[in-house]
Amino acid sequence: MTANDPIHRQGQSVETVDQLSSVTLLGLAVAGAGIAVGIFALIS
């Protein structure tokens, strides 16, 4: 299989989508952590 095969190209595009999803999930995790810290600060 060469880098120019359609299957390989599909794999690359799927990998790119996965990376975007990972960035989104990371953003949600950071936002969630920020909210948790904020709530903790209000309670304390």
Image (cartoon, grey):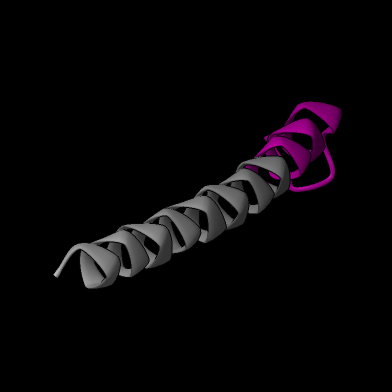
* 8 left or right of 35 in image: right
Q: Is residue 25 magenta?
A: no
Image quadrant in which you'd find residue 2: top right
Name the residue: 41% across, 60% down.
35
Segment tinted magenta in the rendering:
1-15
Q: Is 29 located above or below residue 5 in the figure?
A: below
Q: Out of 20 and 36, give the one closest to the viewer.
A: 36
Q: Is residue 12 magenta?
A: yes
* Residue 28 at x, y percent in the picture: 52, 52
Q: Out of 39 and 3, give the one closest to the viewer.
A: 39
Name the residue: 70% across, 49% down.
16
Q: Out of 30 and 10, give the one closest to the viewer.
A: 30
Image quadrant in which you'd find residue 23: bottom right
> Which corner quadrant holds the C terminus?
bottom left
Name the residue: 52% across, 48% down.
25
Q: Out of 12 and 6, give the one closest to the viewer.
A: 12
* Residue 37 at x, y percent in the picture: 29, 67
> Farthest residue toward the top?
7
* Residue 6 at x, y percent in the picture: 85, 30
* 28 left or right of 18 in image: left
Q: Is 10 located above or below residue 29 in the figure?
A: above
Name the residue: 31% across, 58% down.
36
**Magenta segment, prevailing SS (helix, strand or loop):** helix
> Farthest residue toward the left?
44
Q: Is 6 located above or below residue 27 in the figure?
A: above
> Which corner quadrant holds the N terminus?
top right
* Residue 8 at x, y percent in the picture: 72, 36
Q: How many marks?
A: 0
